[in-house]
Image (cartoon, rainbow, N blue to C red):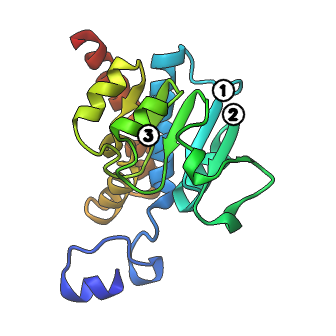
Amino acid sequence: MLVLRELTPHAYCLPEEHGGTGSSSGPTARGVLAALKAASRHVFGTDDLTSRKVVISGFGSVGELIARSLRADVVVSDVDESRRTDEFGWVPPDLAYRTKADVLIPAAVGGVLSQETVEHLDVRLIVGPANNQLTDDSVAGLLEERGIVWVPDHVASAGGVIYTLAREDDGADHETALKRVDGIEATVGKLLARSSAAG
């Protein structure tokens, strides 16, 4: 980001010692958790996931924060086997989208939800920060046909952008910026309510 700042003033998340807000991983994870709360209430009638199984595909900087914040039966997956830990269940990456669970959290690469992948899913809810999760728009229709609620990634993963812009563009303090991130919960609630009402 420091190199990009040399080329343009529109580079964000510089290290704090250089006047930026640093990594956006924390606010991104917080936004996913806010989205998950609203989506869980919509699908399960409660945001309490204690008795639910959650699979997180991608145990990187955001996926790990999400895993450590959840009170649930958490199973993680990552292409880097060294990320494996005894704290959570583990499945290899090729099984992450074939594992029976209540919630799937795509937190790694994009393009993971294809026609073929969705046919093998055994989950009721998908909420995650991975960008561009659908291989094409028709996959959203297939998810709907299978009764799987999907929160679009550009909503679920917006926490980092919301926080960074609030701090670096609007001059908001840390707590104010976090409150804006928490607003994702209300946004997702409205989005899912409207989606249901519109069929």
**Outermost residue toward the right in this view:** 86
- CA gap, disc 1 and disc 3: 22 Å
* Amino acid on which the number 1 mark rests in the picture: Arg
* Position above or below: 199 against 12: above
Residue 154 locus on image (x, y percent): 30, 45
Give me the residue at 37% from left, 24% from top. Answer: 189
Q: Which mark is residue 52?
A: 1
Question: What residue sits right under mark 2 in the picture?
Answer: 72
SS for dot 1: loop
- Tell me if mark 1 has few (under 14), some (14-19) or many (20+) residues whose alpha carbon lies within 10 angstroms of its own: some
Q: Which mark is residue 182?
A: 3
* Amino acid on which the number 3 mark rests in the picture: Asp
* Position above or below: 94 against 43: below
The mark that comes first in sequence, 1 or 3, is 1
- CA gap, disc 1 and disc 2: 6 Å
Residue 124 locus on image (x, y percent): 50, 23
Residue 59 locus on image (x, y percent): 59, 57
- In the rendered view, does 77 fall on the left or right side of 97? right
Task: State the quadrant of the N terminus.
Answer: bottom left
Disc tally is 3
- Tell me if mark 3 has few (under 14), some (14-19) or many (20+) residues whose alpha carbon lies within 10 angstroms of its own: many
Mark 1 and 3 residues: CB-CB less than 8 Å, in contact?
no
SS for dot 3: helix
